[in-house]
Image (cartoon, rainbow, N blue to C red):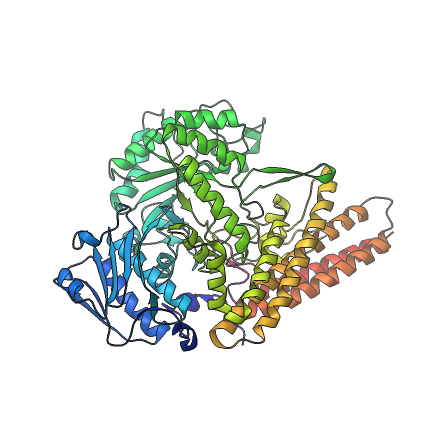
Amino acid sequence: MAERNYAFRQRMSAAHTPGFRNDEKWKRVCGAVISDDWEVVYPFGAPALTEYAARDMAEFLSVSMEVYVRVRASKSIKQELKLRRGRILLATKELLPELSPSDGGELSYRLISDADGIVICANTPRGAAQGVYYVQDRMKIHEGPVLEFTDTERRALFAPRMVHSGFGLDMYPDEHLRQIARQGVTAILIFVSGVDHTPRGYLDFNDLIYRAGRVGLDVYAYNYMHCFCSPDDPSARERYEETYGRLFEACPGLKGIVMVGESCEFPSRDPHVAAYNWEYLREHPELNPEHKPTPGWYPCLDYPDWLRLVTSVIRSHKPDADCVFWTYNWGYVDEKARLELIRALPADISLMATFEMFEKFEKPDGVTVSCVDYTLSFEGPGKYFVSEAQEAHRRGIRLYTMSNTGGLTWDIGVIPYLPCPDQWHLRHEALLKSARMWGLAGLMDSHHYGFWPSIVSELAKTAFWEPQTDYETALRELIARDYGDNNVQTVRAVFRNYSQAIRMYVPTNPDQYGPYRIGPAYPLLFREEAVLESPDYAHFKNNSICNTMYSYDTGRLNCLEYELKSTREMERLLREANAQLYGVCEVLQGRKRANCEALLRLGRFMEYTAHTVINVKNWYLLKLEFLKPDSGKRIIAQKMAEIAEDEIANAARTIPLVEADSRLGYEPSMEYMCDRAHLEWKIRHTRKACEAVAAEAEKQ
């Protein structure tokens, strides 16, 4: 039966997953075995987060492990420690200083598991909650209510780790918040255009801050507030007080704010930029005859003054606000100008630089490949990031990066995550190296394409905590948990092929803002553009971030030929992996079969998307030939018709995938772009284009 659009939200709203218990497996583990006569005990009067963590542990045991324990608060945790047999005991260092972690990190905890019971002693309630989540992770690996004997201290290597909602743009129901916190993420992001106002409309910020805090998450504002006012203007402080100041006065529980050039432009005195913002110039291009960038796309010399003003206004209401300045928009600019800006920035901000973007690679035959937007095809770091990281480190500025390690990039825009763990592992290792070399402290793990808990996010959680588990061990444990012990080798090979396939991906603007953005719903067009159908509540409506009329720099067609060759190899690797995975699905049952079928649908969607990209490029090359005055139009029209029929069939075979899984074809800021309706829309427009080509050919 086909899923309705948005039905994936029902799956996201499940607190815990049933069906993990496998008595044949977990009974082979030597450790503390939890049974129905156990208790989860937490301190009487503890913060709400500690009580939540205790009750979440009990809920997990009942739903996933079929064990039913009692939860209670105790007025004497020290006494409970002496009598801890049959208890999972939660505490903080104030109550059990002798068991507290030696590391002082907010998320650090000590975990003791022995024949008497389990103790989680943390520096803070957030650390205790992370300890609970880790115990749950290990029990799921063992597929039963057992935790191996251990006495270990664990600490997070990155904080904050920030994500946008995968449920819907700026939508955070409680169960999604719980999912996010369990993945080791520490903060969520909301687009803020005013107090209690997002681009989608009203949202009670303080309620969200409260609910997120109950599960151990901070809330960051992602700035969408417009205040086009120079810091030199005599009224500047008053005007910025009306925006930034009013926000933090009304919502002091916000952890901080992320400010990126394109969404916080101001009139700059820098001679390299235009005098107007980009939205105004889009309507009045005649006011920028020299085609200068607008202030959001250049490291203007007065950004330091602007930041001092904005941070001063914010911190007059919240002294410890984390003010994050993101240099995403001008990574293309000469290094000298970028570093001059960083040398002049106030040192009490956090600087964020995107990890892989703007990198260039020289390929055979004079082909240059550039990382124009977020991509996993290059693990990073890029030269842009390194240059800014080195300068921030020299100046003592706290350093963050946009890492996308929640599991998704702009490589394919309407999928939940990229199932390419080997390539993600390379990024994890590069991020950890950056932490050692330049003090990288925090991560933005996703942008508005959202966050989806997956094997990729679990591997990130494993990589970003100490003590670390060997990558290969961690991956094989997760494969065994989700696809069965007997299938580890085969699924490991599938993931190897998926990872190699993403390395064949070529990140270009025509493709990332074209067929890769919406997958097999992308149409083949002739002369007439097609407008994507969007609901009125979509943040990016219609064609705003997807160009349906494919175009390419005709002076670089040798690059297009290279891209075709690489994409064909990508498709081959995906097809081979999917064939292997299909055989695994056939031998599984229950939860593991459902996991395998979901991964296979995702793999096939990626394969069919690569096929679309190939057809789009071939159609475009033929269209260029067709439009030449002296071309043999009828022969070319026939070839174009063959490509169109193949692509129509490709769209048709995608329909069962998106009907079986409503998350495929969806992106939070665009809403649905590759569901059945859009695939049928694509088929109609492709046939219409074919008819137009044939009609023009008949006139020759």
Number of marks in picture = 0
Task: Report the predominant secondary structure element of the magenta stretch.
Answer: loop
Is residue 665 rendered magenta in the image?
A: yes
Tell me if residue 601 can be seen: no
Residue depicted at x 57% and y 72%:
585
Horizontal and vertical percent position of residue 506:
63, 47
Residue depicted at x 28% and y 46%:
103
Q: In this view, does 508 lie above or below 276?
A: below
Residue toward you, 456 or 408: 456
Q: Which quadrant would residue 321 be assigned to in this image? A: top left
Residue toward you, 635 or 660: 660
Horizontal and vertical percent position of residue 224:
40, 43
Is residue 422 rendered magenta in the image?
A: no
Tell me if residue 126 can be seen: yes
Instruction: Judge left or right: residue 143 versus residue 495.
Output: left
Q: Is residue 658 above or below residue 214?
A: below
Q: What stretch is highlighted in magenta?
A: 661-669
Instruction: Judge left or right: residue 341 versus residue 508.
Output: left
Q: Is residue 193 above or below residue 28?
A: above
Instruction: Judge left or right: residue 284 versus residue 474.
Output: right
Horizontal and vertical percent position of residue 247:
30, 43
Horizontal and vertical percent position of residue 47:
20, 57
Instruction: Judge left or right: residue 170 versus residue 498.
Output: left
Q: Which quadrant would residue 284 be assigned to in this image? A: top right
Assign the N terminus to one quadrant of the image.
Answer: bottom right
